[in-house]
Image (tube, helix red, strand yellow):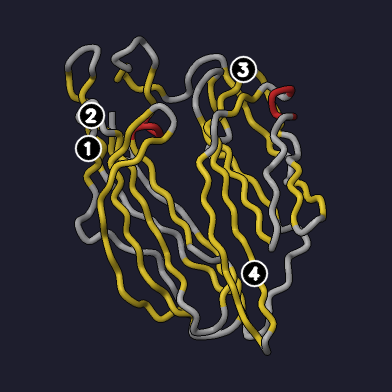
Amino acid sequence: MRRLFDTLLPALLLFGAAPWATAQVPVSAMLSHEQVAVGENFALEIRAEGASVSEPEVAPLEDAGIVLGVPSLGSSTSVSIINGRTSMVQTKTWRYPARATREGRLTVPRIKITVDGQEYFTQPMPLTVTKNAVSPVSPQSRGGGATITLEQMAFAEAATDKTVVFQGEPVTLVLRIFELDDFNVTLRFPQNIPLPESQGFYAGPQATNKRRERRGNFNYRVTEISQVLYPTVPGALRIGAWQWQGELLWTDAGRFRPGNALR
């Protein structure tokens, strides 16, 4: 089995020479998949920005047929001092492991988050849930017969530590590659992996480190690439997509044979 492993992970930065004002809708949500099978794992990511940000109210999702696990939380704070006045903006990201409990065309309902004392809602999102797995692969967990998908074997993420900066203020772009730390999973990718285009920025130091991290029920080897960028012009800039190809290799724990996929 061979597939293309293409990453397409854009990041958006907004900045200018004047203090930033909170957008009309400073909350957003996205799904890692638009189509899943009943019981198949996917991710729901919620983001909010403001001086004071509450926890998202996710209880309505259970009535919609979606069960959430404990989220991983990312947070960053941007502080600016202009003419003696200090302003602070928090950026919080919640990444929930999720699964659907019933088949059909479901809708992820609006999710309420209170930002700076005002209630905001994310947009509803459609989710198609099928009876059978969409693209299962053969490796099985040692504790039973749970199928592991390609998306759980390897995936990539891109993020910045700030979404609002001033001209010349450093912002760190962080790129992460996750490889399942089991079944001899290996993701072969270019040694000098191309970084996203960053027009409008001066590219500063770049660093790479490796570590391990647990996501949900799985342990991963993580390759993290970080680069400091300096915006050279005011306005709204977009960091380009992170796009590359790699080959995913694994060992079938049930049949003891190798598998591979170009992704």
Q: 10 Å neighbourhood of mark 1: few (<14), some, or many (≥20)?
A: many
Q: Residue furthest top?
A: 144
Give the amino acid type for the residue marked by disc 1 in the picture.
Answer: Thr
3D distance between C-alphas at marks 2 and 1: 6 Å
3D distance between C-alphas at marks 4 and 1: 42 Å
Q: Residue furthest left?
A: 257
3D distance between C-alphas at marks 2 and 4: 46 Å
Q: Nearer the viewer, mark 4 or mark 1?
A: 4
- Residue 44 placement (x, y as % from top left): 58, 38
Give the amino acid type for the residue marked by disc 2 in the picture.
Answer: Trp
| Residue with the mark numbered 4 | 88
Q: 10 Å neighbourhood of mark 4: few (<14), some, or many (≥20)?
A: few
Tell me, yes or no, whether the two marked residues, 2 and 1, touch with CB atoms within 8 Å. Answer: yes
Front position in the image: 150 or 160: 160
Q: Name the residue located 34 percent from the left edge and 38 percent from the top edge.
A: 154
Give the amino acid type for the residue marked by disc 4 in the picture.
Answer: Met
Sequence-wise, the earlier of marks 2 and 1 is 1
Tell me, yes or no, whether the two marked residues, 3 and 4, touch with CB atoms within 8 Å. Answer: no
Asked if residue 151 lies left or right of residue 49, the reply is: left
- Residue 251 placement (x, y as % from top left): 20, 24
- Which disc, if any, is residue 101? 3
| Residue with the mark numbered 1 | 186
- Residue 201 placement (x, y as % from top left): 45, 79
Q: Nearer the viewer, mark 3 or mark 4?
A: 4
Decide: is 96 above or below 79.
above
Q: Name the residue located 40 percent from the left edge and 81 percent from the top edge.
A: 202
Sequence-wise, the earlier of marks 4 and 1 is 4
Q: Quadrant of residue 155?
A: top left
Sequence-wise, the earlier of marks 2 and 3 is 3
Give the amino acid type for the residue marked by disc 3 in the picture.
Answer: Thr
| Residue with the mark numbered 2 | 250
